[in-house]
């Protein structure tokens, strides 16, 4: 009895996965559920990576913009010695 087989080729330049060959099960139906779950999972991972990168970019920009204001506030609070 032949089992379902899927040949997957991964392109190293882009993270796309191309399904080349898919054989059906005994009743002749093609198992598209596994293909949809794989594409859905990859889409979710791609979205999460994009969201994480955006969060890091926002935090870095906030720190970069707020640093001068914070530095001036700290310098105002530090007592200086006058001769």
Image (spheres, rainbow, N blue to C red):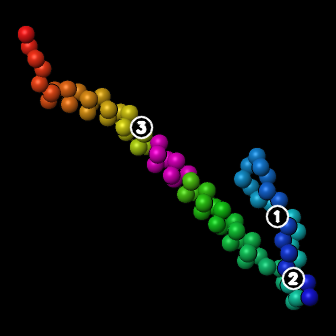
What secondary structure predominates along the stretch shown in magenta? Answer: helix
How far is mark 3 from mark 1, CA to CA? 40 Å
Q: Residue 61, how many percent across, how many down?
A: 41, 37
Please tell me whether residue 56 is drawn above or below residue 42 in the rendered image. Answer: above
Q: Which residues are magenta?
A: 50-57
Is label 1 in a helix, a strand or a loop? Answer: strand
User: Dot 1 corresponds to which residue?
Assistant: 8
Please tell me whether residue 7 is drawn above or below residue 50 in the rendered image. Answer: below
Please tell me whether residue 70 is drawn above or below residue 7 in the rendered image. Answer: above
Contact flag, marks 2 and 3 (Cβ < 8 Å): no
Res. 61 mark:
3
Query: Which residue sits at x=64%, y=66%?
Result: 41
Work out whether residue 41 or residue 80 is closer to the camera in this orientation and state it.
80
* Residue 2 magenta-highlighted: no
Query: Which residue sits at x=68%, y=72%?
Result: 37
How far is mark 2 from mark 3, CA to CA? 53 Å
Q: Residue 67, how many percent across, how many down?
A: 32, 32
User: Dot 2 corresponds to which residue?
Assistant: 3
């Amino acid at each position: 009895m032949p089992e379902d087989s899927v040949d997957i080729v991964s392109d190293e330049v882009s993270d796309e996965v191309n399904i080349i060959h898919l054989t059906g099960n005994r009743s002749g139906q093609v198992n598209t559920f596994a293909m949809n779950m794989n594409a859905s999972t990859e889409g979710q991972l791609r979205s999460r990576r994009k969201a994480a990168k955006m969060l890091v970019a926002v935090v870095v920009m906030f720190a970069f913009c707020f640093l001068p204001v914070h530095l001036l506030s700290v310098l105002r609070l530090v007592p200086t010695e006058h001769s």
